[in-house]
Image (cartoon, rainbow, N blue to C red):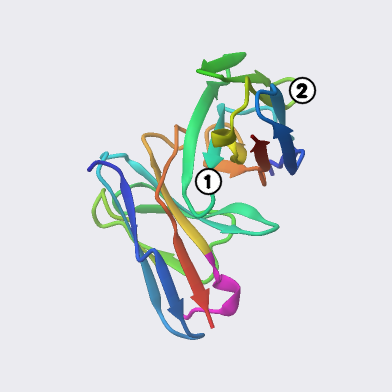
Amino acid sequence: DAGITQSPRYKITETGRQVTLMCHQTWSHSYMFWYRQDLGHGLRLIYYSAAADITDKGEVPDGYVVSRSKTENFPLTLESATRSQTSVYFCASSDSRAGELFFGEGSRLTVL
Amino acid sequence: KQEVTQIPAALSVPEGENLVLNCSFTDSAIYNLQWFRQDPGKGLTSLLLIQSSQREQTSGRLNASLDKSSGRSTLYIAASQPGDSATYLCAVPNSGNTPLVFGKGTRLSVIA
């Protein structure tokens, strides 16, 4: 089915471990985004990408790394997870920077 | 920096009532405004997108208006149903045509 899929949906890890959240879209959208959603803060932009090999920081990029070697994939890596990175992470895609956004189902990450 | 405020934070209404959700933003130089719906444990679903040149958009029982000069948008839901219960979020670009900044949402409960 066409759409945007995230994996894993649920992940528990420990402080200091590396974690990678995967995002795959089948629409061939040029733009992809990573947001995190936390109580009291709402949705905040971590990183976004305009095309393969082009990425830009969002509001809260510290502690995260992204890459985009293929248009359809946009993985998010926490190189050394911290408890403050416990959150729900949403990947989204669009055909333009401020175009209609399509979201994945989210990845719930718990860092112990 | 764009700031988006949604009032009220939560709303409970009886089935069949017409209701209005409010969204305000601080920087009126926006490219568009989008309204989303989020069900518990799910991703966001795009409801309506209003371009900066438009005053309103309609989809079924939903009508969204945009007043750029005053930095406000409203989402009108007609003849509310229990299935409308969800969190509704509005989002605008940070400035011009940049990635979206989200409000914290209004949690709507429609009581049968």
Q: Which of marks 2 and 1 is nearer the N terminus?
A: 1
Q: From the viewer's perspective, is residue B60 above or below residue A84?
A: above
* Kind of residue indicated by mark 1: Asp
Is residue B94 something one can see in this rendering? no
**B69, B44: nearer the viewer:** B44
Q: Disc 1 is attached to a residue of which chain?
A: B
Q: In which quarter of the image is residue A2?
A: top left
Q: For the residues carrying marks 2 and 1, which lies nearer the camera in this image? A: 1
- B90 left or right, relative to B14: left
Q: Disc 2 is attached to a residue of which chain?
A: B
Q: From the viewer's perspective, is residue A6 above or below residue B55?
A: below
Disc marking residue B39: 1
Q: Quadrant of the C terminus of chain A?
A: bottom right
Both marks 2 and 1 on one chain: yes
**B88, A25: nearer the viewer:** B88
Disc marking residue B100: none
Q: Residue at x 69, y 27 (%)?
A: B28
> Magenta stretch?
A78-87
Disc marking residue B70: 2
**A91, B99: nearer the viewer:** A91
Mark pair 2, 1: CA separation: 30 Å
